[in-house]
């Protein structure tokens, strides 16, 4: 028991000792009864049931799946004095030549020594240049990931390359790095050559043990870029291990992910937890190393498929249809793609309305400028301006805190309180203004007087640490609790920390609940503390899997540590460099980022056809086949990895690839594996997956042919997504015709059986309501606000002849029959008009009078005969 208590004491002391501002008192009392039973977690563990394992997928792709254990290594030390001094002069001359090729803004970036890494010197500066100035330097537009042979016509580039090659022959590490980087990134219009890049990285790693070179070698072996062969997971794991032991953060993520998923090595949860925890420690230190309250965590990991409505387009993908559509839409409405212009239009409108004094618009603009977004950089000056404009509607600068100048409406009061919280936070952290603790405290008090959660947390923080006021832990606890009860995640973490410091055993369970709530909002420290608690069995039975989930969340949440590769990938994509974007997203994918895996797979996927009329007639779900086998294999690799991290669209894509043989060796197909993937997606209520399963049961592909099961899946698809209503109705009509024919001809297929009425409403009135839901807002509002003389609801009632419980099939057949009759009538009338016109033309040619020519502009079919 003492050993367990010591572990808990060490754990909790570590969890609070590294704060930017110290907690009220160090933990000195051992927490007892740490093995309390506990259930629940807000981070999904890598358990996607039903999907084929990733090594199994790679085996089907024809790859040799090695299981490799890396031995212990001794990296040794490199002696810089062994380098020929003449080679340094050659490198310097090469850099002068290369600088002559750079745009002015890139030169400014190259001459800056800000943010120098520990090893310093040319290597770190060039590495930063390749990351931060790549958009200015990369002129070459690559059309293929394969090595290209192009004649270099730029004399300065040729001369610089020759000088670097001469210096590299003398084992100059700077020359080796520059040559490797030129070939890997294609800077200065240098042709991409991944094989040459691998060669120079290998020489550099062997000579100096450079961790970045080792990571990139691992990446090249894992993806087989430039090698023309299958990935070599054994070598990738070796280089990742070398780099990870040298504290290369990207390699630590990649190594942890491989142990987590069993890529090139048996699954090992303890190893995965160890490496993820190392990255989590670095990430947490970076997060807490900022101003009070922690650094602002910038997000660059956006799913590019969502800009187009998802992998399958609007209405068919999980991100744009089904149960998760509304939440996904709300998350992405501010981070909309800048190319479509919609964000700029909304932004201009907000500025216009805010300038007229609209409180809501002022609040939105302030938050947008403060937090930033995918299309809007942070601007503290603008944020402060709009927050002050809003606050002036309630307070004047000379009014004492807590006293309003008048009695505003409740809406303005709430928004002004929120603005006061932001202003106080900016003064506390010195964001856009000089740090002023007294002003921060005053503005927080104004927000507290109107119940603002951020202000309550701010006052609590200042009481906790004695900033601009006397230190008072009890008052801090009260303010933290009040804010936490309003759902403010930072306050939930702060309150949980005070509970963890309490000697009361019951406080541990309460702290866990508050941390879980904060983790559900993505708070970095909540992830960290829960990971520590699961890893050490604090308040629950120890769980390595759950600890890995939380450590992984911390490691991936702070994207600036590493870096992840998303920022460079987004820039490359924005300037039209598809190949460069794919490589950077692949780099993020190798580190275990699901968004990176999804982005790389989406760009590599050759099938971008959203809808093909022939697909319905051929009963095929995919209409366009990817052209390049190697790209198919890479796409399948990343779709399968993304699917194993609960990406529903990737699960379905994975099934499509199995169904049609994309990426598999010798173009073989495996419908049973496809069905497994669709079943896994169906558990996430995917209408697309349910429709696919219905289609497979209808046609007996990969599963037993069963019309009744097919109908059940079609019905579930319609219930899961209103966007699936129309295609499901057509599929059900075809299915019923086939079922009737099967019964009439004495077929052996299990037909549609009578059962209880479906729970969905397929009446004419409901169909009309669904149609209006897809029309412009004015029409939809007019329909919803209509006067109903019969007091019907759009779903009907128990006495409604158009409502729930009737024979939906007969009604649908009647509607379709009427549509067909109207169509035939119009076709017959058109044929009749054509015959009349032909007769009239013939009569004119023979000099006969034209019948029915009663005037210009009148249609023939209105002329009486």
Image (cartoon, rainbow, N blue to C red):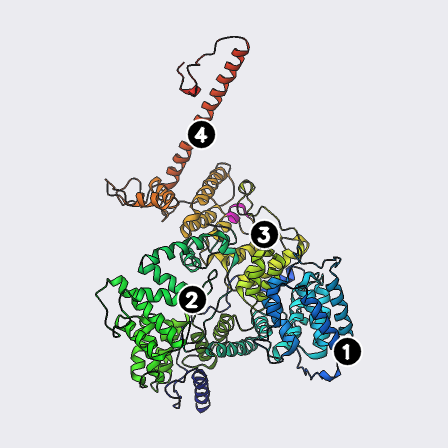
Q: How far across and down, in percent of the image, does residue 739 sit?
A: 47, 41
Q: Is residue 826 above or below residue 616?
A: above
- Name the mark nearer the viewer: 3 or 4: 4
Q: Name the residue tied to disc 1.
A: 86
- Name the mark nearer the viewer: 4 or 1: 1
Is 390 in front, or is 266? 390
Give the magenta range.
695-700
Q: How far across and down, in percent of the image, does residue 18 sit?
A: 46, 83
Q: What crowding class fits label 3: few (fewer than 14 Cα within 10 Å), some (14-19), or many (20 or more)? A: many
Q: CA distance from mark 2 to mark 1?
A: 51 Å
Q: Name the residue tied to disc 2.
A: 371
- Name the mark nearer the viewer: 4 or 2: 2
Identify the disc placed on residue 823. Answer: 4
Q: Name the residue tied to disc 3.
A: 659
Q: N-terminal of the two: label 2 or label 1?
A: 1
Farthest residue to the left: give it: 407
Q: Quadrant of the C terminus?
A: top left
Q: Quadrant of the N terminus?
A: bottom left
Residue 856: quadrant of the picture: top left
């Amino acid at each position: 028991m003492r050993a367990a208590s010591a572990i808990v004491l060490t754990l909790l002391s570590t969890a609070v000792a590294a704060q930017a501002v110290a907690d009220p008192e160090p933990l000195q009392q051992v927490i007892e009864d740490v093995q309390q039973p506990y259930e629940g977690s807000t981070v999904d563990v890598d358990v996607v049931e039903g999907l084929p394992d990733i090594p199994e997928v790679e085996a089907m792709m024809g790859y040799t799946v090695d299981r490799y254990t890396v031995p212990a290594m001794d990296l040794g030390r490199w002696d810089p004095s062994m380098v020929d001094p003449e080679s340094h002069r050659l490198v310097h001359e090469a850099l002068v030549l290369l600088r002559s090729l750079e745009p002015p803004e890139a030169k400014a970036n190259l001459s800056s020594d800000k943010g120098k890494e520990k090893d310093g010197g040319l290597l770190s500066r060039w590495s930063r240049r390749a990351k931060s100035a790549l958009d200015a330097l990369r002129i070459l537009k690559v059309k293929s990931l394969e090595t290209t042979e192009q004649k270099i016509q730029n004399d300065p580039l040729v001369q610089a390359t020759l000088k670097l090659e001469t210096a590299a022959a003398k084992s100059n590490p700077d020359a080796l790095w520059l040559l490797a980087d030129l070939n890997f990134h294609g800077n200065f219009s240098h042709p991409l050559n991944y094989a040459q890049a691998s060669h120079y990285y290998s020489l550099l790693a062997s000579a100096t043990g450079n961790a970045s070179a080792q990571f990139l070698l691992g990446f090249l072996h894992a993806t087989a870029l430039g090698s023309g062969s299958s990935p070599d997971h054994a070598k990738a794991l070796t280089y990742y291990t070398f780099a990870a032991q040298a504290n290369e953060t990207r390699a630590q993520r990649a190594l942890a992910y491989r142990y987590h998923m069993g890529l090139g090595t048996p699954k090992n949860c303890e190893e995965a937890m160890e490496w993820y925890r190392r990255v989590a420690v670095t990430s947490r230190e970076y997060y807490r190393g900022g101003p009070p309250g922690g650094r602002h965590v910038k997000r660059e990991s956006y799913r590019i498929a969502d800009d187009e409505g998802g992998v399958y387009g609007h209405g068919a993908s999980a991100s744009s249809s089904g149960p998760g559509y509304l939440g996904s839409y709300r998350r992405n409405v501010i981070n909309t793609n800048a190319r479509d212009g919609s964000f700029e239009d909304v932004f201009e409108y907000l500025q216009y309305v805010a300038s007229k004094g609209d409180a809501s618009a002022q609040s939105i603009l302030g938050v947008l400028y403060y937090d930033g977004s995918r299309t809007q950089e942070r601007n503290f000056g603008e944020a402060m301006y709009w927050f002050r404009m809003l606050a002036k509607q309630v307070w004047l600068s000379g009014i004492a805190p807590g006293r309003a100048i008048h009695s505003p409406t409740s809406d303005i009061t709430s928004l002004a309180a929120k603005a006061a919280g932001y202003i106080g936070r900016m003064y506390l952290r010195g964001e856009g203004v000089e740090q002023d603790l007294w002003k921060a405290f005053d503005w927080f008090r104004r927000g507290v007087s109107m119940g603002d959660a951020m202000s309550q947390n701010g006052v609590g923080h200042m009481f906790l640490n004695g900033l601009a006021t006397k230190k008072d832990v009890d008052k801090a606890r009260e303010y933290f609790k009040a804010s936490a009860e309003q759902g403010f995640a930072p306050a939930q973490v702060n309150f949980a920390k005070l509970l963890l410091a309490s000697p009361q055993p019951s406080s541990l369970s309460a702290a866990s609940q508050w941390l879980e709530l904060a983790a559900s909002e993505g708070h970095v420290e909540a992830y960290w503390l829960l990971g520590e608690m699961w890893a050490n069995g604090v308040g629950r039975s120890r769980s390595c899997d759950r600890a890995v989930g939380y450590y992984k969340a911390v490691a991936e949440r702070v994207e600036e540590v590493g870096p992840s590769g998303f920022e460079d990938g987004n820039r490359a994509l924005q300037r039209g460099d598809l190949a460069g974007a794919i490589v950077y997203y692949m780099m993020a994918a190798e580190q275990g980022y699901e968004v990176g895996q999804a982005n790389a797979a989406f760009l590599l996927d050759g099938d971008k056809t959203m809808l093909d009329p022939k697909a319905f007639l051929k009963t095929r779900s995919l209409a366009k086949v990817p052209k390049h086998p190697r790209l198919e294999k890479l796409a399948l690799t990343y779709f399968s990895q993304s699917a194993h991290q609960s990406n529903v669209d990737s699960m379905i894509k994975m099934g499509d690839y199995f169904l049609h043989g994309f990426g598999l060796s010798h173009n073989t197909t495996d419908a049973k594996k496809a069905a497994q993937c669709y079943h896994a997606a169906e558990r996430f209520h995917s209408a697309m997956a349910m429709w696919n399963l219905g289609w497979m049961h209808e046609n007996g592909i990969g599963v037993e042919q069963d019309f009744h099961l097919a109908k059940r899946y079609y019905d579930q698809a319609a219930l899961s997504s209103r966007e699936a209503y129309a295609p499901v109705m057509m599929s059900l009509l075809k299915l019923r015709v086939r079922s009737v024919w099967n019964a009439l001809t004495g077929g052996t297929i299990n037909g549609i059986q009578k059962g209880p009425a479906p729970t969905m409403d397929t009446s004419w009135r409901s169909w009309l309501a669904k149609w209006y839901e897809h029309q412009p807002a004015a029409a939809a509002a007019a329909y919803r606000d209509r006067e109903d003389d019969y007091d019907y609801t759009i779903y009907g009632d128990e006495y409604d002849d158009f409502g729930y419980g009737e024979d939906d099939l007969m009604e649908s057949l009647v509607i379709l029959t009427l549509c067909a009759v109207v169509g035939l009538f119009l076709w017959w009338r058109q044929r009749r008009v054509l015959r009349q016109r032909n007769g009239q033309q013939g009569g004119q040619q023979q000099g006969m009078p034209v019948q029915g020519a009663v005037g210009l502009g009148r249609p023939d079919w209105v002329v009486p005969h």
